[in-house]
Amino acid sequence: MKYLPPFALIFLLSVSLVTAQRELGVKPAKTGGPLSANQAAYDVQSYDINVNVKPAEQSIEGVVTVTAKIVNPTNVLDLDLENVFTVSDVSMIGAAGKATTLKFTRPDGKILAWFPMTKQAGESVSVRVIYFGKPRVAPRPPWVGGIMWEKTADGSPWISIATQNDGADTWIPVKDHPSDKASSVALHATVPQPLVVAAFGKLQTVKKNADGTSTYNWLMTNPISNYEIVFNAAPYKIIKDRYKSIYGDYIPIEFYILPEDFEKGAWLIDETKKYTAFFEKYLGPYPFRSQKLGIAETPHLGMEHSTMIAYGNKFKKTDDGFDSLMLHEYGHEWWANLVTGSDWRDFWIHEGFQSFMDTLYLEHIYKGNQDKYFAEMKKRMKNTRNVQPVAPREEKIAYEVYLQAPDYIKGDGDIYGKGAVVLHTLRYVMGDATFFRALRRMCYPTKAMERVTDGRQARLVNTDDFLTIVNEESGKDYSWFFELYLRQPKLAKLDVDKKGGKLVLKWDTPNNIPFPMPVDVEMNGKVRRVEMPGGTATIDIEGSGDPVIDPKGWVFRSDLAK
C-alpha cells in the first residue's frame, strides 16, 4: 500500500502515563529514512513467509516470497535483510510456479536481485528468497529489537520478536520502509511441539508434523507495517471471547497466555473491552473486525503488533485501576495500524495521538471530571525536552525521531508527551466538538469508511493531512499552531505585565513565528478567554487580587516545561 495524498514506543516506559528518560546503552538498527530509487520502483502486495524456527540452535531457516507491483521501470528488486543471514537462492516465480534463478548481491544489509530484463510499470513480480542463520538477539527489547529466545517458568522455550525501531529485516527479507505496507501476509511457522504460535490475522490451519514439530498457518488480509510482521511462540493456552462493536458486528478476541497466568487472563480481556468502548466512542469502530482482537503474552514489555498485541506488563494496574500498557498498545490499532505515518518523521501520529488518548481515558473513567486529566497533562509538560522537532519535515529513520540526538541511545519522549500536550492545547483552541470531529476524521475520513473492513480503511498519512482536517473542520487556518509546536522544538513564552490597571499579554516566539494563541485569565473568581489575534492583548484588571493566567493549564508554553 503506497502513500496517498490527503483523504485519498510503542509502549509506555512504566505504568505511569508520563514518559520518562531511559538510557538504552545501544542504538537500534536503521529502519526507514529516504526511500531509494530502487525501492520506490515497486509496491509490495504480499509476503508469504515460511520459517522453520529452531530454539535449541537459536536459528531459523526461511523461504520468503515477495509479490510486488512495478511502479517505475527497474531491473533490480532491492530488499532489506541483515547480514547475519546466508542467502542460498533468489528466484523469480512464474505464473505456473516455475522458478528462474536470479543473480543477486549482498551489499550491507541488502539483497539486490537482478531481473534478466527490465520490468515495466504495471507488471507484477514474485521473488522467492531462501536463507538461514541466527537472527540478532534483541539487546534491549522492545526499544532496541530483534528476536528473544527466552524460557517460561517451567523451562519451555518462549520466543518473541519486536522490531519497531529496527525493522523486520532483522528476521525476514522485506522492503523496510513505512510507506509501503503489504496488503496481505501469510506466515507458516514451524516450531517444536508443544509450542503454540501466535501471530497476525486469522489462524488458518495447524499441522502436526512427523518430526515432532507443528506448523501454524496464519493469514492477514488487511495492510500491515513490516515491523508488525512478527510471531510469538510458547506453550500458550488460548482464551477466546468476543465483543460487539458499535456497528453491531462481533470482534473475535483471542488471548495467547502462559499457562501459569491463565486465571489472570479474564481480567485483562474485560479491561480491553472497556478500552474498546472508549476508543470506539471517540475514534470510530475497531479497525480490524474482519480479523480479530488478539493479545499474546510476551517476555518484553509490549508492542502494538496489529491484531496480536504484544503484552508483557504482568497484569499491573495503575492507581486508577486499569492496565496502562494494554490501553496504550491496544490504542495503536487506531493510531499506527489504521492510520500509519508514511515516514518516520510523522512517528508522533502514532505515539503522540495515542498518548493523548491515554490521558483522555482518565477523564473518561471519571465521567467528565478533568482533574486527573489536567494533572497528567501538566506532568507531561514538565517532562518534555524541546530539543528537536516533534514532526520534522525531512525524511527520518525511526531512531532519529524516537530517540535523542546525537548518540540515539536515550529515550527522547517528545513524540509521546509533547505530542499529547500539543493535542491537548489544540483541543482548547478549537473547542471540544470541533476537535473531536477532527480526531475521528483523521481515523476515518467519512462515515461510510467506518463500515469498511476489507483493508481499504487503512491509510498512510502525514502531519499536513491532519492540518488540512483541522482547518476544514474549524473553518480556520491553524498553520501557525503546527509551525510552532511541531515543526521546530522551542516553545513560546508568555510575557505578562501590569500597567496602570491594565493587564498586558504578549507572546514571545522563536524566530518570531506568528502565534495568535488565546489564553484564559481568571479575575474575581471568573474565567474569561482573552483572544490575542496579533499575539498581544491588553485588558482591564478587575477586582483587587492578582489575575491568574491559564488557571487550568490548557496552553503549553515555556514556563510549563522543565
Image (cartoon, rainbow, N blue to C red):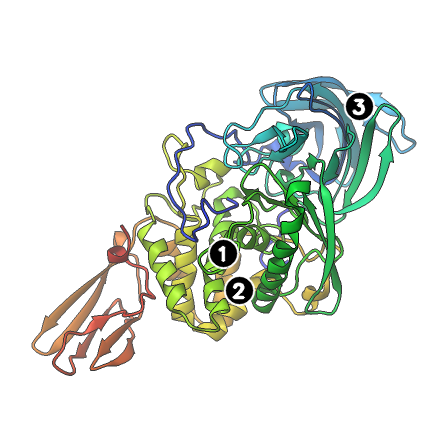
Callout 1 touching callout 2 (CB < 8 Å): yes
- 4 or 227, which is in the foreground? 227
| Lower sequence index among marks 1 and 2 | 1
Instruction: Count up the numbered dots.
Output: 3
Q: Which mark is residue 91?
A: 3
Label 3 sits on a secondary structure element that is strand
Q: Pointer 1: residues within 10 angstroms few (<14), some, or many (20+)?
A: many
Callout 3 touching callout 2 (CB < 8 Å): no
| Lower sequence index among marks 3 and 2 | 3
Cα gap from disc 3 to disc 2, whole angstroms: 45 Å
Q: Residue placed at 63% from the left, 60% from the top?
A: 270
Residue type, numbered disc 2: Leu
Where does label 1 land, which residue?
353
- Is residue 367 shown above or below 419? below
Cα gap from disc 1 to disc 2, whole angstroms: 9 Å
Q: Residue placed at 62% from the left, 18% from the top?
A: 84
Residue type, numbered disc 1: Phe
Where does label 2 land, which residue?
439
- Is residue 311 shown above or below 425? above
- Left or right, residue 190 beside residue 27: right
Q: Place residue 408 in its image quadrant.
A: top left
- 423 or 32, which is in the foreground? 423
| Lower sequence index among marks 1 and 3 | 3
Task: From the top left corner, tell me how far across and down residue 276 is, in percent.
Answer: 62, 62
Q: Pointer 3: residues within 10 angstroms few (<14), some, or many (20+)?
A: many
Query: Visible in this render: residue 341?
Result: yes
Q: Place residue 175 in its image quadrant.
A: top right
- Left or right, residue 268 beside residue 375: right
Label 2 sits on a secondary structure element that is helix
Q: Residue placed at 40% from the left, 58% from the top?
A: 422
Label 1 sits on a secondary structure element that is helix
